[in-house]
Image (tube, helix red, strand yellow):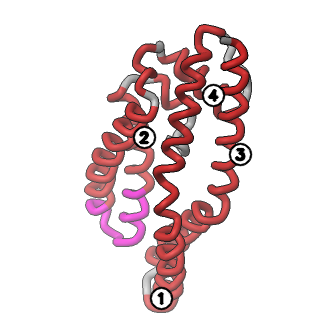
Amino acid sequence: MVTIPAVVWRGGFALRALTVGGAVGLCAGALAWLDSGFWISGVIVLVIVGTFYGIWMARRMARYWPDAGDLSGRERVSVARAVRRGEPVDDHRLATSAIDYSRGLHAAAEKGRWLRWLLIFVLVVAAGTAVWDSVYGSWGNTVASGIYLVALAVEVFWMPKHQAQLLANADRTATLARKAL
């Protein structure tokens, strides 16, 4: 939920699953195709990863912000955008929703903290794999491993700072929303 942009909240459960699952599935499928050289493997990864990740993430989003179903798509996007930016919500009726979304962001971030050590381990393995692929693999293997390595490095080194800023913004908006109530 922490990495999901505000605009994804515009749709209902199915559209959120399709949007998030489609984006992740497309990226994973493209990397699978690039790595294997077979377009069918890319399609299989697109469908499987996209379906399961999309449903899992849409369920997770609904779990961490259960009151989102009571709002229209435009209101959900407005609240999510304001909270992520640390701004007050435009409509005072949405103050409670902003507080709930802020709580959801904090809960989702806290739930994912225990995986940080695993990401560091995977980054080390990915670095070794990238070196191996550059020496013994095809150009597709090398490029795919390099992309995986960069994505993991971003997740390990940049994302914690971005997440801390996002949570600080959420706290700011929640404080403003409590004052508005």
**Disc 2 to disc 3: CB gap under 8 Å:** no
Q: Secondary structure at mark 2?
A: helix
* Residue projecting furthest to the bottom: 135
**Does residue 31 belong to the magenta stretch?**
yes
Inspect the image, locate mark 3, and give the three-letter code of the amino acid beneath it: Gln
| Residue beneath disc 4 | 81
Give amino acid for label 2: Val
Left or right position of 138 against 86:
left
N-terminal-most mark, 3 or 4: 4
Q: Please name the residue shown 66% across and 11% down the image.
A: 181
- The part of the chain drawn in magenta is 28-41
Q: Nearer the viewer, mark 4 or mark 2?
A: 4
- Gap in Å between the C-alphas at discs 3 and 1? 36 Å
In this view, the mark in front (3 or 4): 3
Q: Nearer the viewer, mark 2 or mark 3?
A: 3
Q: Earlier in the sequence, mark 1 or mark 4?
A: 4
The residue shown at (33%, 59%) is 42
- The residue pinned by badge 3 equals 165
Q: Report the amino acid beneath label 1.
A: Trp
